[in-house]
Image (spheres, grey):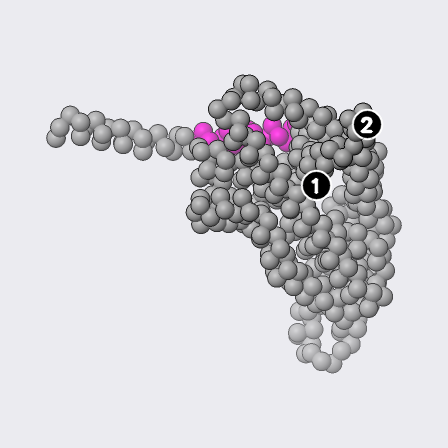
Amino acid sequence: MSETGRSIRTRVRDLGQGQPVRWLLGIVALILVGWAFHALAAVIVPLVFAIMLALILAPLDSAISARLPSKVSWLSRLAIMMLLVLVLASFVMGLVYCADQLLAQLPSVDRMRSILETRLEGLTDSDSMSHGTRAIVVDVLQRSTDALSGWLVGAGGTLLQQIAGATGTLLAATILVVFLVLLIIDEASLWTSKTDSLWSDVAPQMQEALQATASKLRSWLVVRTGIGVLSAAAYLGWLILFDVGLLAVWAVLTFLLVFIPNIGSVISGVLPTIYAFFTKDFVTALWIAAGLFAIEQIIGNWIDPRIQGRQIAVSPVVIFVSLLLWGWIWGIAGAFLATPVTVAIMVICAHIPAARPLALLLSDQSNLSALDKKIAS
């Protein structure tokens, strides 16, 4: 065998032997980055929120400034600030309102068990099933409700208390995000000049990536808002038919949880069903569950994909995994940020030659050409 052939075989063998080490180092680096993001959440989360909001609102700021005399162009920033304060404060107060109301209505474990015993007595007295079947059903329901009541009062109650008790912190974070957004928008042109000066060869691609990211984020936000309003209205209409209490809470909660993919729709359907079970009766709770499930299937599997699918190109599996990942790293904030962060990562990677394979893996497209068309649309 020639010397060249031996050299090629040696290089291939060395490459194969080094591949597991590189994968291991990559996994370790990813874990360390995740840990750093988790540890620095108090700093990074407001910054990520601010950057995304600045990308979304920059065209609105430019449009308002262009229609104002130069001497009063600062009014565009004032309008942006007022809009942000209104939207973010409404979002925060909506969460706090739902937490307060649910805490006030959340029954104790003993109360849940008492209601369950009443439900089970009616089931036991029924002659529609045999004694053995009845005993199995009663045992399963009792075990399930014990676990459910413990979770609601334990983990669920703790979470609600944290949200309700963090009103001041959440509002302070809102003000911080607003000022960060204003500073980012105000210095956007300066940072554009810096990138042109430092990296003139890649600056156009960077600007194109940011513009594409901003466009996808705006589309995602508009679609999510529309789907949230539709879902809240549909849920509210169905619950009104059964005279379920806390209607305002379910409507607000349904709208807010639309911004959390997959899990949000499950929570917004399960909570009113559980509430109806403990305040109404078993049959009513079943009807409510069936109706909310049907609404979610229509909106989530038919309307939403036909609208949202035209706007973003992220794989549903990737979105679900990102929800688990960012939720673990940043908690509730990470759950809300999961989809926009993943969309931004995919679009930016699609504009970096070395990272384009990662963009394709994150997307729901089969090849890079289709992904480029999706991002450009």
Q: Quadrant of the N terminus?
A: top left
The magenta span reads 24-40
> Label 1: which residue?
332
Foreground residue, 21 or 72?
Answer: 72
The Cα–Cα distance between marks 1 and 2, rounded to whole angstroms, is 39 Å
Q: Picture coordinates of residue 131 (x, y %)? A: 69, 76
Image check: 1 left or right of 334?
Answer: left
* Camera-side residue of 220 and 138: 220
User: Is 210 rendered above or below residue 116?
Assistant: above
**What amino acid does circle 2 point to?**
Val
- Of residue 263 and residue 350, the one placed in the foreground of this image is 350
Which residue is at 64% across, 46% downward?
219
Q: Nearer the viewer, residue 4 or 353?
A: 353
The residue beneath circle 2 is 72
Task: Tell me if mark 1 has few (under 14), some (14-19) or many (20+) residues whose alpha carbon lies within 10 angstroms of its own.
Answer: some
Instruction: For marks 1 and 2, give the one nearer the viewer.
Output: 2
88 versus 175 height, above or below: below
Q: Position of residue 306 (x, y in %)?
A: 60, 58
Residue 144, x across and y down, in percent: 70, 59
Residue 42 seen in the current view: no
What is the chief secondary structure element of the magenta stretch? helix
Category of crowding for the residue at label 2, using alpha-carbon neighbours closer than 10 angstroms: few (below 14), some (14–19), many (at least 20): few
Q: Position of residue 296 (x, y in %)?
A: 67, 61
Amino acid type, label 1 = Ile
